[in-house]
Amino acid sequence: MITGSIVALVTPMTQSGAIDWLALDKIIEFHIDKGTKSIVAVGTSGESSTLSPAEHCAVIKRVVDRVAGRIPVIAGTGANNTQEAIKLSLEAKNLGVDACLSVVPYYNKPTQEGIYLHFKTIAEAVDIAQILYNVPGRTVADMQEQTTLRLAEIDNIVGIKDATGDVERNISLVKNAPKGFAVYSGDDVTAVELMLAGGHGNISVTANVAPEKMSALCELAIAGKTQEARSLNDLLMPLHEQLFMESNPIPVKWAVAQLGLMDEGIRLPLTRLSEEFRKPLKQAMLKLNVL
Protein backbone atom coordinates (compact mmCIF):
# COMPACT_ATOMS: atom_id res chain seq x y z
CA MET A 1 0.00 0.00 0.00
CA ILE A 2 1.26 3.47 -0.93
CA THR A 3 1.14 5.77 2.11
CA GLY A 4 2.18 9.27 3.10
CA SER A 5 2.60 12.41 1.01
CA ILE A 6 1.70 11.84 -2.63
CA VAL A 7 2.22 14.86 -4.86
CA ALA A 8 -0.38 15.70 -7.49
CA LEU A 9 2.40 16.78 -9.81
CA VAL A 10 2.16 19.86 -12.03
CA THR A 11 3.16 19.57 -15.68
CA PRO A 12 5.74 22.30 -16.39
CA MET A 13 5.32 24.32 -19.56
CA THR A 14 7.20 27.08 -21.34
CA GLN A 15 5.72 30.52 -21.90
CA SER A 16 4.35 29.26 -25.21
CA GLY A 17 2.59 26.31 -23.54
CA ALA A 18 4.94 23.57 -24.73
CA ILE A 19 5.76 20.85 -22.19
CA ASP A 20 9.14 21.57 -20.60
CA TRP A 21 10.72 18.13 -20.33
CA LEU A 22 13.92 19.27 -18.61
CA ALA A 23 11.92 21.14 -15.98
CA LEU A 24 9.84 18.00 -15.44
CA ASP A 25 13.02 16.06 -14.73
CA LYS A 26 14.13 18.75 -12.27
CA ILE A 27 10.81 18.72 -10.43
CA ILE A 28 10.83 14.92 -10.11
CA GLU A 29 14.32 15.01 -8.57
CA PHE A 30 13.17 17.81 -6.24
CA HIS A 31 10.37 15.60 -4.89
CA ILE A 32 12.48 12.51 -4.45
CA ASP A 33 15.10 14.60 -2.62
CA LYS A 34 12.50 16.25 -0.37
CA GLY A 35 10.82 13.06 0.82
CA THR A 36 7.67 12.82 -1.32
CA LYS A 37 6.50 9.21 -1.12
CA SER A 38 4.78 8.90 -4.51
CA ILE A 39 3.98 10.94 -7.62
CA VAL A 40 0.67 11.28 -9.45
CA ALA A 41 1.41 12.12 -13.09
CA VAL A 42 -1.20 13.92 -15.19
CA GLY A 43 -3.97 14.32 -12.69
CA THR A 44 -5.96 17.52 -12.30
CA SER A 45 -2.87 19.42 -11.14
CA GLY A 46 -0.98 18.01 -14.13
CA GLU A 47 -3.45 19.65 -16.53
CA SER A 48 -4.83 16.40 -17.86
CA SER A 49 -7.67 18.44 -19.36
CA THR A 50 -5.33 20.52 -21.55
CA LEU A 51 -2.96 17.78 -22.76
CA SER A 52 -3.53 15.74 -25.90
CA PRO A 53 -3.74 11.94 -25.48
CA ALA A 54 -0.24 11.59 -26.92
CA GLU A 55 1.14 14.23 -24.54
CA HIS A 56 -0.70 12.60 -21.64
CA CYS A 57 1.07 9.29 -22.24
CA ALA A 58 4.40 10.98 -22.98
CA VAL A 59 4.37 12.73 -19.60
CA ILE A 60 3.56 9.46 -17.82
CA LYS A 61 6.45 7.77 -19.64
CA ARG A 62 8.87 10.55 -18.73
CA VAL A 63 7.89 10.39 -15.07
CA VAL A 64 8.21 6.59 -14.93
CA ASP A 65 11.57 6.67 -16.70
CA ARG A 66 12.97 9.45 -14.53
CA VAL A 67 11.74 8.01 -11.25
CA ALA A 68 13.26 4.66 -12.24
CA GLY A 69 11.58 2.73 -9.45
CA ARG A 70 12.76 4.97 -6.61
CA ILE A 71 9.18 5.78 -5.51
CA PRO A 72 5.79 4.59 -6.82
CA VAL A 73 4.23 6.38 -9.78
CA ILE A 74 0.46 6.71 -10.11
CA ALA A 75 -0.96 7.76 -13.48
CA GLY A 76 -4.08 9.82 -13.92
CA THR A 77 -6.14 7.80 -16.41
CA GLY A 78 -9.72 8.88 -15.78
CA ALA A 79 -12.25 9.91 -18.41
CA ASN A 80 -15.99 10.39 -18.78
CA ASN A 81 -15.87 7.83 -21.58
CA THR A 82 -15.35 4.34 -20.15
CA GLN A 83 -13.54 3.00 -23.22
CA GLU A 84 -11.18 5.99 -23.22
CA ALA A 85 -10.38 5.38 -19.54
CA ILE A 86 -9.65 1.72 -20.34
CA LYS A 87 -7.32 2.73 -23.17
CA LEU A 88 -5.43 5.22 -20.98
CA SER A 89 -5.16 2.67 -18.17
CA LEU A 90 -3.77 0.03 -20.54
CA GLU A 91 -1.20 2.46 -21.91
CA ALA A 92 -0.20 3.53 -18.40
CA LYS A 93 0.21 -0.10 -17.35
CA ASN A 94 2.39 -0.78 -20.37
CA LEU A 95 4.52 2.25 -19.48
CA GLY A 96 5.22 0.75 -16.05
CA VAL A 97 3.18 2.73 -13.54
CA ASP A 98 2.38 1.24 -10.14
CA ALA A 99 -1.29 2.27 -10.11
CA CYS A 100 -3.91 4.31 -11.95
CA LEU A 101 -5.99 7.15 -10.53
CA SER A 102 -9.41 7.28 -12.16
CA VAL A 103 -11.82 10.15 -11.64
CA VAL A 104 -15.62 9.84 -11.40
CA PRO A 105 -16.99 10.54 -14.89
CA TYR A 106 -17.60 14.25 -15.34
CA TYR A 107 -20.17 16.27 -17.33
CA ASN A 108 -22.49 13.40 -18.26
CA LYS A 109 -23.81 13.01 -14.66
CA PRO A 110 -24.01 9.21 -14.34
CA THR A 111 -26.17 7.48 -11.74
CA GLN A 112 -24.56 5.59 -8.85
CA GLU A 113 -25.07 2.38 -10.81
CA GLY A 114 -23.43 4.00 -13.82
CA ILE A 115 -20.44 5.06 -11.69
CA TYR A 116 -20.18 1.53 -10.26
CA LEU A 117 -20.30 -0.14 -13.67
CA HIS A 118 -17.83 2.38 -15.14
CA PHE A 119 -15.14 1.57 -12.57
CA LYS A 120 -15.96 -2.16 -12.51
CA THR A 121 -15.56 -2.34 -16.28
CA ILE A 122 -12.18 -0.57 -16.17
CA ALA A 123 -10.92 -2.79 -13.34
CA GLU A 124 -11.94 -5.96 -15.18
CA ALA A 125 -10.36 -4.78 -18.43
CA VAL A 126 -6.98 -3.70 -17.03
CA ASP A 127 -5.03 -5.80 -14.54
CA ILE A 128 -3.46 -2.98 -12.54
CA ALA A 129 -4.15 -1.37 -9.17
CA GLN A 130 -6.90 1.24 -9.50
CA ILE A 131 -7.46 4.18 -7.15
CA LEU A 132 -10.85 5.84 -7.40
CA TYR A 133 -11.05 9.65 -7.38
CA ASN A 134 -14.15 11.44 -6.09
CA VAL A 135 -14.10 15.21 -6.59
CA PRO A 136 -17.71 16.38 -7.00
CA GLY A 137 -16.66 20.04 -7.04
CA ARG A 138 -15.29 19.34 -10.53
CA THR A 139 -17.25 16.34 -11.78
CA VAL A 140 -20.75 17.29 -10.51
CA ALA A 141 -21.44 13.58 -10.03
CA ASP A 142 -20.69 12.51 -6.45
CA MET A 143 -19.82 8.89 -5.72
CA GLN A 144 -21.61 7.90 -2.53
CA GLU A 145 -20.04 5.80 0.23
CA GLN A 146 -22.06 2.69 -0.57
CA THR A 147 -20.91 2.82 -4.19
CA THR A 148 -17.29 3.13 -3.03
CA LEU A 149 -17.69 0.18 -0.69
CA ARG A 150 -19.18 -1.96 -3.46
CA LEU A 151 -16.22 -1.11 -5.66
CA ALA A 152 -13.77 -1.86 -2.84
CA GLU A 153 -14.82 -5.51 -3.11
CA ILE A 154 -13.17 -5.72 -6.55
CA ASP A 155 -9.65 -7.08 -6.13
CA ASN A 156 -7.66 -4.49 -8.09
CA ILE A 157 -9.60 -1.46 -6.86
CA VAL A 158 -7.25 -0.68 -4.01
CA GLY A 159 -8.15 2.79 -2.74
CA ILE A 160 -9.83 6.14 -3.16
CA LYS A 161 -8.78 9.77 -3.29
CA ASP A 162 -11.61 11.61 -1.55
CA ALA A 163 -11.61 15.31 -2.39
CA THR A 164 -14.99 16.18 -0.93
CA GLY A 165 -13.46 17.96 2.07
CA ASP A 166 -16.25 16.49 4.20
CA VAL A 167 -14.47 15.30 7.35
CA GLU A 168 -17.43 13.33 8.79
CA ARG A 169 -17.88 11.56 5.50
CA ASN A 170 -14.14 10.85 5.28
CA ILE A 171 -14.11 9.32 8.76
CA SER A 172 -17.12 7.14 7.95
CA LEU A 173 -15.40 5.88 4.82
CA VAL A 174 -12.20 5.04 6.72
CA LYS A 175 -14.26 3.21 9.35
CA ASN A 176 -16.28 1.14 6.89
CA ALA A 177 -13.69 0.41 4.20
CA PRO A 178 -12.38 -3.16 4.07
CA LYS A 179 -8.90 -3.97 5.33
CA GLY A 180 -6.29 -3.24 2.70
CA PHE A 181 -8.36 -0.54 0.97
CA ALA A 182 -6.51 2.79 1.13
CA VAL A 183 -8.36 6.02 1.83
CA TYR A 184 -6.43 9.11 0.76
CA SER A 185 -7.38 12.72 1.17
CA GLY A 186 -7.55 14.89 -1.92
CA ASP A 187 -8.20 18.07 0.05
CA ASP A 188 -5.16 19.68 1.69
CA VAL A 189 -7.20 21.76 4.13
CA THR A 190 -8.87 18.74 5.77
CA ALA A 191 -6.29 16.03 5.02
CA VAL A 192 -4.82 15.98 8.53
CA GLU A 193 -8.17 15.01 10.06
CA LEU A 194 -8.68 12.14 7.62
CA MET A 195 -5.21 10.77 8.35
CA LEU A 196 -5.62 11.13 12.11
CA ALA A 197 -8.81 9.08 11.74
CA GLY A 198 -6.93 6.26 10.04
CA GLY A 199 -6.50 7.48 6.47
CA HIS A 200 -3.42 6.42 4.57
CA GLY A 201 -2.08 9.62 3.06
CA ASN A 202 -2.72 12.79 1.12
CA ILE A 203 -2.68 13.26 -2.65
CA SER A 204 -1.60 16.84 -2.33
CA VAL A 205 -1.43 20.08 -4.28
CA THR A 206 0.48 21.77 -1.46
CA ALA A 207 3.21 19.12 -1.71
CA ASN A 208 4.26 20.72 -5.01
CA VAL A 209 5.42 23.77 -3.05
CA ALA A 210 6.29 22.44 0.42
CA PRO A 211 7.15 18.75 -0.06
CA GLU A 212 9.27 18.32 3.08
CA LYS A 213 6.61 19.80 5.34
CA MET A 214 3.80 17.84 3.70
CA SER A 215 5.77 14.63 4.06
CA ALA A 216 6.39 15.39 7.75
CA LEU A 217 2.70 16.22 8.26
CA CYS A 218 1.59 12.93 6.74
CA GLU A 219 4.05 10.92 8.82
CA LEU A 220 2.91 12.62 12.04
CA ALA A 221 -0.80 12.21 11.28
CA ILE A 222 -0.57 8.58 10.16
CA ALA A 223 1.41 7.83 13.32
CA GLY A 224 -1.42 9.33 15.39
CA LYS A 225 0.66 12.22 16.76
CA THR A 226 -2.34 14.49 16.96
CA GLN A 227 -0.92 17.61 18.58
CA GLU A 228 2.23 17.71 16.44
CA ALA A 229 0.30 17.04 13.23
CA ARG A 230 -2.31 19.72 13.88
CA SER A 231 0.37 22.24 14.88
CA LEU A 232 2.24 21.67 11.62
CA ASN A 233 -1.01 21.81 9.66
CA ASP A 234 -1.80 25.18 11.27
CA LEU A 235 1.48 26.48 9.87
CA LEU A 236 0.63 25.10 6.44
CA MET A 237 -2.96 26.35 6.41
CA PRO A 238 -2.29 29.78 4.83
CA LEU A 239 -0.50 28.04 1.96
CA HIS A 240 -3.29 25.45 1.61
CA GLU A 241 -5.82 28.27 1.34
CA GLN A 242 -3.86 30.50 -1.04
CA LEU A 243 -3.29 27.62 -3.44
CA PHE A 244 -7.03 27.47 -4.07
CA MET A 245 -7.83 31.18 -4.47
CA GLU A 246 -8.24 30.45 -8.17
CA SER A 247 -8.90 27.12 -9.89
CA ASN A 248 -6.20 24.50 -9.43
CA PRO A 249 -3.59 24.33 -10.95
CA ILE A 250 -3.43 28.08 -11.62
CA PRO A 251 -1.99 29.13 -8.22
CA VAL A 252 0.26 26.11 -7.73
CA LYS A 253 1.89 26.48 -11.14
CA TRP A 254 2.70 30.11 -10.34
CA ALA A 255 4.06 29.08 -6.94
CA VAL A 256 6.31 26.33 -8.35
CA ALA A 257 7.63 28.84 -10.89
CA GLN A 258 8.61 31.12 -7.99
CA LEU A 259 10.72 28.26 -6.62
CA GLY A 260 12.77 28.43 -9.81
CA LEU A 261 11.81 24.93 -10.90
CA MET A 262 9.93 25.90 -14.05
CA ASP A 263 8.48 28.73 -16.12
CA GLU A 264 4.98 30.17 -15.61
CA GLY A 265 3.52 28.45 -18.68
CA ILE A 266 -0.09 27.27 -18.58
CA ARG A 267 -2.63 26.43 -21.29
CA LEU A 268 -5.96 27.98 -22.11
CA PRO A 269 -8.63 27.99 -20.93
CA LEU A 270 -6.51 28.21 -17.77
CA THR A 271 -4.73 31.51 -17.28
CA ARG A 272 -1.84 32.71 -15.13
CA LEU A 273 -2.55 33.66 -11.54
CA SER A 274 -4.30 37.02 -11.18
CA GLU A 275 -2.10 39.81 -9.88
CA GLU A 276 -4.20 40.29 -6.74
CA PHE A 277 -3.42 36.76 -5.50
CA ARG A 278 0.32 36.79 -6.11
CA LYS A 279 1.44 38.78 -3.09
CA PRO A 280 -0.57 36.78 -0.49
CA LEU A 281 0.60 33.48 -2.01
CA LYS A 282 4.21 34.65 -1.98
CA GLN A 283 3.81 35.76 1.65
CA ALA A 284 2.48 32.32 2.62
CA MET A 285 5.49 30.72 0.96
CA LEU A 286 7.93 33.09 2.67
CA LYS A 287 6.34 32.46 6.06
CA LEU A 288 6.98 28.73 5.65
CA ASN A 289 10.55 29.35 4.48
CA VAL A 290 9.98 27.49 1.22
CA LEU A 291 10.88 30.57 -0.82
Image: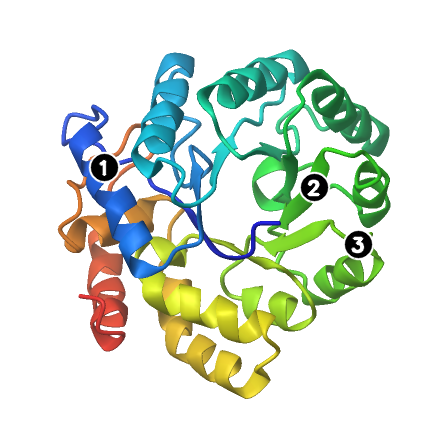
Against 245, is 136 above or below? above
Between disc 2 and disc 1, whose residue precedes?
1
Q: How many marks?
A: 3
Among the two numbered marks 3 and 1 on one chain, the one whose residue lies closer to the N terminus: 1
Dividing the picture into quadrants, the one containing residue 113 is top right
Q: Amino acid at mark 2?
A: Val
How far from the left and from the top, in percent, is residue 101? 57, 35
Mark drawn on residue 25: 1
Q: Residue at x 72, y 42 (%)?
A: 142
Q: Position of residue 144 (x, y in %)?
A: 79, 45
**Can you identify the residue that label 3 sits on?**
179
Q: Secondary structure at mark 2?
A: strand
Query: What is the three-letter code of the residue carrying label 3?
Result: Lys
- Quarter of the image for residue 42 reads top left
| Residue at the extreme bottom of the image, as rendered | 227
Residue visible at 45% across and 21% down in the picture: 95
Q: Earlier in the sequence, mark 2 or mark 3?
A: 2
Secondary structure under tag 3 reads loop
- Closest to the observer, 126 or 205: 126
Residue under label 2: 158
